[in-house]
Image: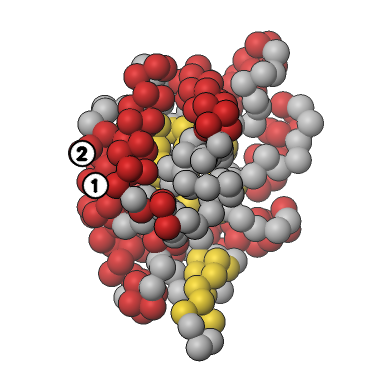
């Protein structure tokens, strides 16, 4: 497996980017450039990545292809296709989005998120994105989320079957599926279940820790790796069993100093 940072690192050019990659001693990265960059600049980023043996693990979309506003939805689908084509162009491991929320907030909870109509629209939209681009070097993936499909390994397996496209794969964010005290309490077993059921399809992993806060209701939040419940030695072993080059990204931290702290902890394991 290869550790990485799911952040753009604040770089302004390829030289700054590769200097930060060396500083943090990572071997995977999210796309360091955008689809709209000049071709010569894209090539320079890719040249440096190849020279330093850095895998480009992810290209993000993060648009709501299930938006209730039809104009917003169409624009999001068009952008998703552009990003998938870009991921294929640069040979990223995967292009990732959430399935989408049936409302105004792109990652929000709405009862309609779990309607049969929304599920069928997710299946049709995902097929449309993949079929329009026909990627050959990358995969389209959905990040599991707390309150939309897919929210469990079995839900993801069902979607893999229903979407039925070779270019549809899995983005592994086990933390986003730890949505109950039972899953939190049996964290090691649940993470093993995620990897064992979805392992053959996994293209990228988010390495996030979780903490349970004792309140009158269940509250589980993300935390700095090494400060919560997750057994990261197990996570890295499971990722490595699937693919020795699996990108495993620290993410959602507040500063490069926090990322460095997380990486040093993960590297120590």
**Residue highlighted by disc 2:** 161
* Residue 143 screen position, x and y as percent: 44, 46
Q: Judge the density around disc 1: few (<14), some (14-19), many (≥20) Cα neighbours within 10 Å.
A: some
Q: Nearer the viewer, residue 122 or 152?
A: 122
Residue at 68% over, 33% down: 18
Classify residue 119 as left or right of residue 264.
Answer: left
**Residue highlighted by disc 1:** 157
CB atoms at circles 2 and 1 under 8 Å apart? yes
Could you tell me if residue 149 is visible in this image?
yes
Q: Residue furthest right?
A: 12
* Residue 225 screen position, x and y as percent: 55, 65
Tag 2 secondary structure: helix
Classify residue 84 as left or right of residue 200.
Answer: right
Q: Judge the density around disc 2: few (<14), some (14-19), many (≥20) Cα neighbours within 10 Å.
A: few
* Residue 265 screen position, x and y as percent: 56, 64
Q: Nearer the viewer, residue 193 or 29?
A: 193
Residue at 55% over, 66% down: 222
Tag 1 secondary structure: helix
């Amino acid at each position: 497996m290869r550790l990485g940072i799911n952040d753009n690192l604040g770089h302004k050019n390829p030289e700054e980017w590769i200097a930060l990659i060396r500083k943090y001693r990572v071997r995977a990265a999210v796309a360091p450039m955008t689809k709209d960059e000049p071709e010569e600049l894209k090539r320079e980023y890719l040249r440096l990545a190849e020279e330093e043996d850095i895998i480009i693990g992810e290209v993000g979309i993060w648009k709501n292809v299930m938006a209730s506003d039809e104009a917003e939805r169409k624009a999001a689908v068009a952008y998703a296709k552009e990003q998938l084509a870009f991921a294929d162009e640069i040979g990223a491991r995967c292009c990732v989005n959430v399935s989408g929320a049936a409302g105004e907030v792109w990652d929000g909870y709405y009862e309609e998120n779990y309607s049969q109509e929304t599920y069928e629209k997710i299946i049709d939209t995902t097929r449309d994105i993949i079929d329009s681009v026909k990627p050959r070097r990358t995969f389209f993936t959905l990040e599991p989320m707390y309150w939309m499909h897919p929210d469990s390994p079995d839900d993801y397996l069902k979607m893999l079957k229903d979407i039925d496209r070779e270019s549809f794969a899995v983005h592994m964010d086990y933390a986003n599926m730890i949505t109950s005290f039972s899953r939190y309490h049996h964290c090691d077993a649940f993470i093993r279940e995620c990897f064992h059921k979805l392992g053959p399809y996994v293209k990228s992993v988010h390495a996030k820790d979780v903490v349970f806060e004792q309140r009158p209701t269940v509250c589980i939040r993300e935390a700095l790796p090494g400060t919560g419940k997750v057994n990261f030695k197990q996570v890295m072993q499971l990722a490595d069993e699937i693919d020795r080059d699996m990108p495993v990204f620290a993410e959602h931290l507040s500063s490069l100093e926090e990322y460095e702290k997380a990486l040093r902890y993960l590297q120590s394991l």
